[in-house]
């Protein structure tokens, strides 16, 4: 077998193996969510750009970076995936930014409660230490039943788990005595 064909076959088998591992990890994460008692940290769906434009006002969506059509579809697909798998959602909290609220509402998995402890602190918009500490306390205190869905921003999730997150991606965590452990990641648009 020529070297190029052997290399291509080896590469293909490696990629297929990684897909299998990823699918198994997703299956385990979905199963854990079905049992309840977990927290879903979700970055708002696709809202092209970075930060917010000059003149940003929290209560006025027209002054903010908002979901694109693809972002709205992404949020609806995430909600559909949760409902289709019978994932129990006991409460939904969201940042007060329109793109986060819209994501949470489009998911249609329960009433959405806007809360300041999920607001973005990108570019000095809020007190990072206070917001992160309150979010950590809320996560550590969660006992269920069901799961807690928190729709927030990339900077907030990075501060909590120490790694980045894509638009619409969910990081599932399990509360521990005074912290939490990561159970898995879900990206419905990529599953």
Image (cartoon, rainbow, N blue to C red):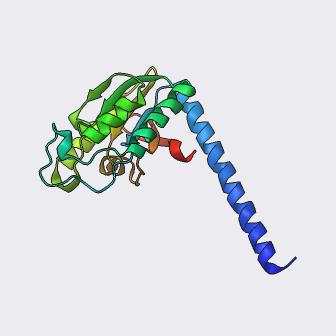
Measuring 19% from the left and 54% from the top, which residue is drawn there? 53
The quarter in which the C terminus is drawn is: top right
Measuring 59% from the left and 41% from the top, which residue is drawn there? 26
Residue 186 in sight here: no
Residue 73 in sight here: yes
Residue projecting furthest to the bottom: 3
Residue projecting furthest to the left: 55
Q: Measured along the vertical axis of the image, is residue 54 above or below residue 43?
A: below
In this rendering, position of residue 51 left or right of residue 151: left
The quarter in which the N terminus is drawn is: bottom right
Circle count? 0
Residue 75: percent from left, percent from top: 42, 37
Measuring 30% from the left and 56% from the top, which residue is drawn there? 49
Residue projecting furthest to the front: 69
Quadrant of the image occupied by residue 137: top left
Residue 70: percent from left, percent from top: 42, 45
In this rendering, position of residue 174 left or right of residue 14: left
Q: Foreground residue, 98 or 132?
A: 98
Measuring 32% from the left and 50% from the top, which residue is drawn there? 159
Q: Measured along the vertical axis of the image, is residue 6 above or below residue 96?
A: below
Quadrant of the image occupied by residue 89: top left
Residue 122: percent from left, percent from top: 23, 53
Quadrant of the image occupied by residue 149: top left
């Amino acid at each position: 077998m020529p070297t190029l064909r052997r290399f291509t076959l080896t590469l293909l088998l490696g990629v297929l193996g990684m897909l299998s591992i990823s699918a198994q990890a997703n299956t385990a994460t979905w199963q854990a969510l079905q049992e309840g008692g977990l927290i879903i940290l979700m970055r708002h769906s696709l809202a092209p750009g970075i930060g917010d434009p000059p003149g940003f006002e929290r209560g006025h969506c027209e002054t903010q970076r908002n979901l694109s059509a693809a972002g709205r579809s992404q949020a609806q697909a995430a909600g559909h995936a949760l409902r289709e798998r019978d994932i129990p959602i006991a409460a939904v909290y969201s940042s007060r930014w329109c793109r986060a609220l819209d994501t949470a509402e489009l998911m249609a998995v329960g009433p959405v409660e806007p809360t300041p402890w999920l607001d973005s602190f990108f570019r000095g918009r809020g007190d990072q230490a206070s917001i992160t500490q309150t979010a950590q306390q809320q996560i550590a205190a969660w006992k269920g039943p069901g799961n807690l869905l928190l729709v927030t921003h990339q900077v907030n999730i990075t501060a909590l788990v120490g790694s980045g997150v894509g638009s619409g991606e969910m990081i599932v965590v399990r509360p521990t005595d005074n912290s939490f452990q990561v159970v898995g990641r879900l990206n419905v648009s990529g599953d």
